[in-house]
Image: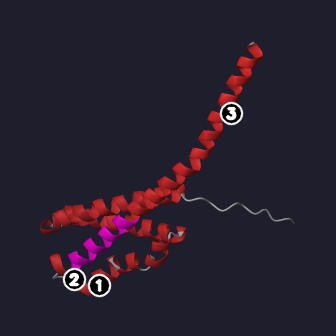
Amino acid sequence: MADSKLDVQSREATSEQSSKQQDQPAKAAFKLSLWRRISLFSYAATLLLTFNWLTWYSPPTEVPRALLLLILVVPLVLPVRGFIHGRAMSYVAVAMVAMWLFAAGLDVAFYIQDWTLLGWALTGCSVVLFVACYFYLRYLPRPPKIEHEN
């Protein structure tokens, strides 16, 4: 009788482990799609905020508008194709640009009185973009390593 109880407990334990193992890929796929959606949304928000800020909301008067568009918007637009298709290197590039926009947003929020709200909005959008890119890359499945024979 004791052996049958142990057998039942061991079967239950293995069935729980197998169900947990089956749930892990589903959870990882859900997290991957969630972070991808968040990153795409925050990418669009950051791009639109930056572009509209420099062209429509309050265009700069002391610095040529084209120069600021080249510095702030063009690096965000370059990896757009790979970013939309979910390529890892494009997400890395966008995360690096998000760090640059974070610094620019803080600079504007603290030192330019007319644009304080826009600076904080850019800072917030760039933080969300960076975190979303990080977690997307975290949950992205990696290809298996190929060992070369020498």
- Considering the numbered disc 1 on the image, is that residue within a helix, a strand or a loop? helix
Helix, strand or loop for disc 3: helix
Q: Which residue is mark 1?
A: 67
Q: Would you say 137 lies left or right of 3 here? A: left
**Image point (43%, 80%), residue name:** 78
Residue for badge 2? 63
Amino acid type at image mark 1? Leu
Q: Does the magenta stretch mainly form a helix, a strand or a loop?
A: helix
Task: Give the answer, above or below, for where 74 lies relative to 135.
Answer: below
Q: Quadrant of the N terminus?
A: top right
Which sits in the foreground, 132 or 16? Answer: 16
Which is more foreground, mark 3 or mark 1? 3
In the image, 2 versus 85, the foreground residue is: 2
Give the residue at mark 3: 14
Q: How many marks?
A: 3
Q: Residue at x 43, y 57 (%)?
A: 34
Q: Mark yes or no: residue 59 visible.
A: no
CB under 8 Å between callouts 2 and 1? Answer: yes
Q: Amino acid at mark 3?
A: Thr
Image coords of residue 95 (percent x, y)? 43, 65
